[in-house]
Amino acid sequence: MKAFLAVLTTAALVLPAGISAQEQIDLTVASSHPTVVPWVGMIQTHFMARTDELLAETGTYQINWNEAFGGQLYKANATLSSVEDGITDIGWVFSFLEPAQLPLSQVSTNTPFAVTDVPALLEVIDELLVSNEAFKAEWEDHNVKVLGLTATDLYDIYTKEPLEGIADIAGMKLSAPGVLGSWLRGTGANAVDGALTTFYTDVQTGVSDGALSLALGVLPIKLYEVAPYINRFDAAAAFSGAIAINMDTWETLPEEVQAAMIEAGKYYTESHGQQMVELHEVALNTMVEQGANQNPKVTIVNMPAEERQKWVDMLPNLAAEWATPLEAQGVPAVEFVKQYMAALRAKGVEPSRAWDEEL
């Protein structure tokens, strides 16, 4: 037996590297939202799948994914801290709900109606994460590394009763996620803080009269059942968050795994941006089809372009109100707004309001 074991040991020492044992890496990936929400589902189908595909090319490493989607580990109000503290290794950080911790990440929501081109928006945010040290640092200072970016499709107002124009929302209670409540300022409507996970119940129980939300988020939660009128303004898209990895976890990963995740993150971002464009109309039409037999049936109320412009013109100077206090705290928000708006224009985007000129 000793001789036999010695032979095995010697053989192991001379085996070619190409047939060495594959190293297994255990990682937890989580989110506050369920996978039926498109950008969360794409973590599985695009980020994770692409990472696995790239690692399979050499076969050196394999990731054992421990999936905890749909709020199994934490809710929407703890997406940043849960990645930061290592409750999950990788997670979708919902930046909308982190204005104090991720101030510059709120730039698109504090310059509303600036962009409807989702791929262009994501390209600009990605470029700023490289070129603007303050923007990059506000993520990395929370012990996370950004791997992929998410944005919304276009925002509309979902209500129990149809609107004739933006003036009709005066006096209404409308659910909106975090900072997006500011888009209702000056309109006479009252924002009710919430998220996709709460909108249905809030409208159903009368906490709110409707919601400021987006088609691809509304479709899977079936908000149209209780708010059947889709008042279509095509208000804007906004940067909403990122797939991020705990920095301590990141530093333990082999370079090959890191490289695979970086490439997978880029693939996720590009695919997600295109999906927002392609599926927005599909989602709207699907809601109309699925709600055709309910009472009242789901109806899209197309708002004239002038009503959209009336809405943005009603808003106070949100960019200045947001940027000025941050400047007093040492956050270079004014320059960041200027860089952001200039980058959008460089990609052919013409904002509906020149927020940078109002600073």
Image (cartoon, rainbow, N blue to C red):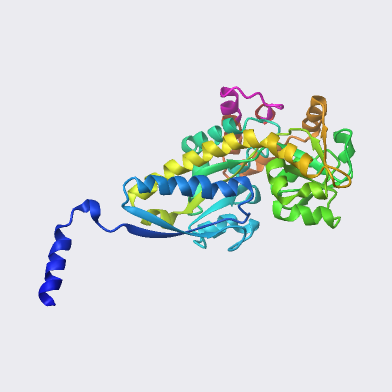
Q: Residue at x 66, y 38 (%)?
A: 153
Image vertical order of residue 328 relative to residue 310, above or below: below
> In terms of image quadrants, where is residue 183?
top right
> In terms of image quadrants, where is residue 112?
top right
Please provide percent x and percent y for residue 175: 78, 49
> In terms of image quadrants, where is residue 345?
top right
Q: Residue furthest bottom?
A: 1
Q: Residue furthest left?
A: 3
Front residue of this view, candidates 103 and 5: 5
Please provide percent x and percent y for residue 288: 78, 39
Was residue 249 drawn as part of the magenta stretch in this picture? no
Front residue of this view, candidates 206 and 81: 206
Q: Residue at x 61, y 56 (%)?
A: 32
Front residue of this view, candidates 328 and 40: 40
Q: Is the C terminus in the top left, top right, bottom left or bottom right quadrant?
A: top right
Q: Is residue 103 left or right of residue 284?
A: left
Image vertical order of residue 9 relative to residue 107, above or below: below
Please provide percent x and percent y for residue 192: 79, 51
| Residue 272 visible in the picture | yes
Q: Residue at x 64, y 56 (%)?
A: 76
Image vertical order of residue 154 relative to residue 222, above or below: above
| Residue 319 visible in the picture | no
Q: Residue at x 13, y 77 (%)?
A: 1
Magenta part of the chain:
341-355
Was residue 342 drawn as part of the magenta stretch in this picture? yes
